[in-house]
Image (cartoon, rainbow, N blue to C red):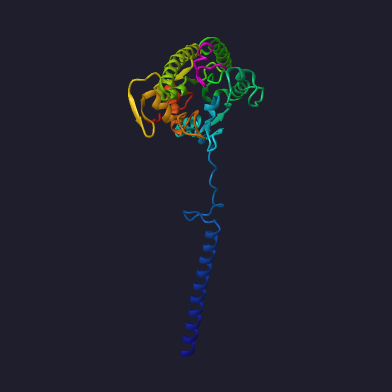
Amino acid sequence: MSTQREELSVHAAGKLLARITARKAMRGVVLTLALTGMIGTAGGCSGPAPKRAAPAQHDRPPVSYYLALGDSLSQGVQPDASGASVRTAHGYPDQLYAALHRRQPGLRLVKLGCPGETTVTMIHGGICSYPGGSQLAAAVRFVRAHQARVALITLDIGANDPDSCITDFSIVKLPSCAGRSVSQAATNLTTILATLRQTDAHARIIAMNYYLPALAEWRNGLAGQILARLGEVAVTGYNMLLGGIYQRFGVRVADVSGAFHTADFSPQVTLPGLGRLPRNVAAICQWTWECAPPPRGPNQHPDQAGYQVITHAFLLAGAGQPARGSTGSPGSRPGV
């Protein structure tokens, strides 16, 4: 009897051990399947875990373009430590692009400007190398290739024309810069804007008028003060001419002359090392290299703060307003 009970106990223990072993084996299978992704989260069987979908094409910001045309200002030229005028990444197109890109992440900057460019060479070429032979031809080619996506075109041209009233102004140059040179520049600018408008009738184009580097001559006694006043009269007339041409072609004007207080001789501003100066003279000394000591000065190009002032003028003219589905935001400029 005792032997039978022992046999039954051994038999029952064997069955119990078999059940425990089977359950452990099943758990191992379940764990293996779960690790290989063959068990669903709800406990059912499924295929391998799905891969994460790639971002849809429409989630990317639409690409648009800001096309900067013109002369050295459109390339951010400033004097280096040796006094050589060099391109920089701090010009008004770069600063304007940075301001606009915050609201338009798909915006791209294309700079076609050429240091030393005149209204003649912009049309016919001769200084910088371009596909098509000239800056204007390259601009037309670019706009045609990306017409629906060109959000903004900016332009500064005319300051480097022969006998210009803007650069290297002198009393000797006054008769020519106020007469023949202005007339030729007006004719060429008309051709440039007509060509751009024929390429894209609805493009948003903003062009700038000019400050007067010769105001720095005020610091050189009575003769310099007479030259500064004559230069202000000449550049005011030239800027009025530019404004009339821009208006004919639906081009907005970035009032850089006003931003630099070009006509404002009356308030006196004190600058370290330069003393008390008329407000317009102080602006030239503070925002360009014209009053800087050698080797960097005198140089007519803006410094980084001056380019910021020009940038602000373009924003005030509407560079930051919505265009073709885009938006922008205005910046701020230093005061004088």
Residue 15 coordinates in the image, percent (x, y): 50, 76
Q: Position of residue 272 (x, y in %)?
A: 37, 34
Is 314 above or below relative to 55?
A: above
Foreground pick, 23 / 152:
152
Residue 91 relative to residue 277: left or right: right
Q: Residue at x 41, y 22 (%)?
A: 221
Residue 83 in view, yes or no:
yes
Residue 173 belongs to magenta span: yes
- Name, please, the residue furthest toward the bottom: 2
Quadrant in which residue 278 is drawn: top left
Magenta span contains residue 319: no
| Nearer the observer, 38 or 276 | 276
Q: Furthest-left residue in view?
A: 267
Question: Can you say whether 29 is above or below 2 in the image?
Answer: above
| Magenta stretch: dominant secondary structure | loop
Horizontal side of 308 relative to 30 (left or right) equals left
Q: Which quadrant would residue 142 be assigned to in this image?
A: top right
Q: 200 and 293: which one is in front?
A: 293
Q: Which residues are magenta?
A: 162-176
Residue at left offset 46%, top offset 14%: 234
Residue 330 vertical placement versus 235 (above, below):
below
Q: In which quadrant is the C terminus drawn?
A: top left
